[in-house]
Amino acid sequence: MEFAHPGVFWLFLLIPLMAGWYGWRERSFQGSLGVSGLKGFAAAPKSVVPRLRHLTILLRLLALSALIVALARPQSSLSWQNTTTEGIDIVISYDISGSMLAEDFKPNRLEAGKQIAIDFIKDRPNDRIGLVVFSGESFTQCPLTIDHDVLVNLFDDLSYGMIEDGTAIGMGLATAVNRLKGSEAKSKVVILLTDGSNNMGSIAPLTAAEIAKQFNVRVYTIGMGTNGYANMPIQTSMGVQYQRVKVQIDEPTLKEIAATTGGKYFRATNNEKLERIYEWIDRMEKARIEVTQYRKKTEMFLPFALVALGLILVEFILRNTLLRGALT
C-alpha cells in the first residue's frame, strides 16, 4: 500500500493536542464536596455509565485518525516489469563440415561448440539471436528470434551430413549478414566459427566481410582446433577409421574479416578456451536494459472514510442516549 498525499499525516499532531485539551477540560470541571461520611453512598445503585464518559473522546480521536488516513488517499499498487533491450541482434554462423568431427575437443569439435554456444544463448535471454550453418554451402537454420527454446532445440539438431561437405566460409558469413541487413538494432553481430579454410562457395570470405562492413555488422571470428594434429574419423572401405590429420585454419583470413568489420579474432584450442571466448564476447556485447514499469492502482480511502463515519455515528448515539446524563 502507498499513499498519494503522505503530507496529510502531519494532521496526526492534532491527536495529542485534542487528548491534552480533553484532560485539561476534565480537571477544570472537577470540584470538591465535604461530607461527614460515605455510609449514605453505599445504598446507591452502582453503574458503569459514568466510567464510560471518556469513551466519547476515544471514539472521536479514532474517527479523526481514520479520516486522516482516508485524506492521505491510500492506494494498493499492482506492478510488474517488462525488460527490453536497447538493441542487439546476433547471428551465429556455425561450421558443420566433416572436419568438425575431430576429437581434439570433447567429445568432438561439433558437439563441444554446440554446447558452449547454447550456454551463451541461455545467458542472453533479452537478445534476438539467429543461427546459420555452413559446410559446402550455407542456409539459415533459425532466423533472428527471441524464442530461445526453439533456437536451442534447432542447435541441438545440428549434425554432420545435413548439407554437402566442404568449407564455404564466405557463404556462411554472407548468409548471416543477409539475416542482419534489415535489422534496426543498434548493434548487429555475427559470431563466425570454423575449423578450416575456405574451399567452396561463390562468395569469397573477404568479399563477405566488406558486405558486412557496409551494413555495420561486426564479426567475431573463431578458429577452432588444436595446434598440430588431431584425431579425425575418416570413412574408408574398411569402415570408419581414425587418422591423425594436420589442423589447418586460415587464420590470416579470419583475422582480416574481424579487422575489416571492427570485430576480433580468437583461436580456441580446447573446450575451456572456447568457453572463455564466448564469455568475453558476452561481456563485450551486453545490451543495456531499459525497464518499463507498469502500475495498476486501486483507491483504498473508502474503507477508512466509512470507519470514520461509523465511529462518529457511534459517538453521537452514545452521547445522546446512554451517556447523556453522564456528560451533562
Image: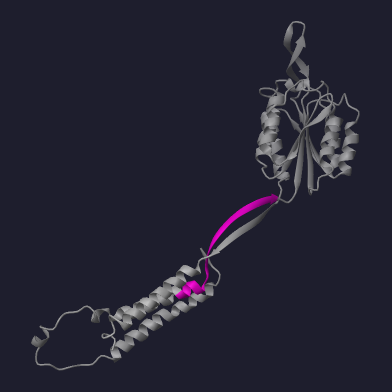
In this orientation, which residue lies closer to the viewer: 107 or 52?
52
The structure residue drawn at horizontal position 68% and vertical position 38%, both measured from the top left corner, is 148
The structure residue drawn at horizontal position 22% and vertical position 78%, both measured from the top left corner, is 48
Q: Position of residue 33 (x, y in %)?
A: 17, 93
Figure colour scheme: one colour
Q: Is residue 279 above or below residue 251?
A: below
Q: Position of residue 179 (x, y in %)?
A: 82, 38
**Which quarter of the figure is the C terminus placed in?**
bottom left
Q: Position of residue 270 (x, y in %)?
A: 69, 28
In this orientation, which residue lies closer to the viewer: 303 or 293?
303
In this orientation, which residue lies closer to the viewer: 245 or 30?
30
Give the side of residue 33 with respect to residue 323, left or right: left
In this orientation, which residue lies closer to the viewer: 69 or 248?
69
Q: Which residues are magenta?
A: 67-84
Q: Position of residue 324 (x, y in %)?
A: 29, 84
Give the side of residue 197 with respect to residue 230, left or right: right
User: Can residue 116 be seen in this snapshot?
Assistant: yes
The structure residue drawn at horizontal position 75% and vertical position 49%, both measured from the top left corner, is 87
Give the side of residue 33 with respect to residue 71, left or right: left
Quarter-of-image position of residue 77: bottom right
User: Can residue 275 be seen in this snapshot?
Assistant: no
Q: Is residue 220 above or below residue 72?
A: above
Q: Is residue 273 above or below residue 49?
A: above
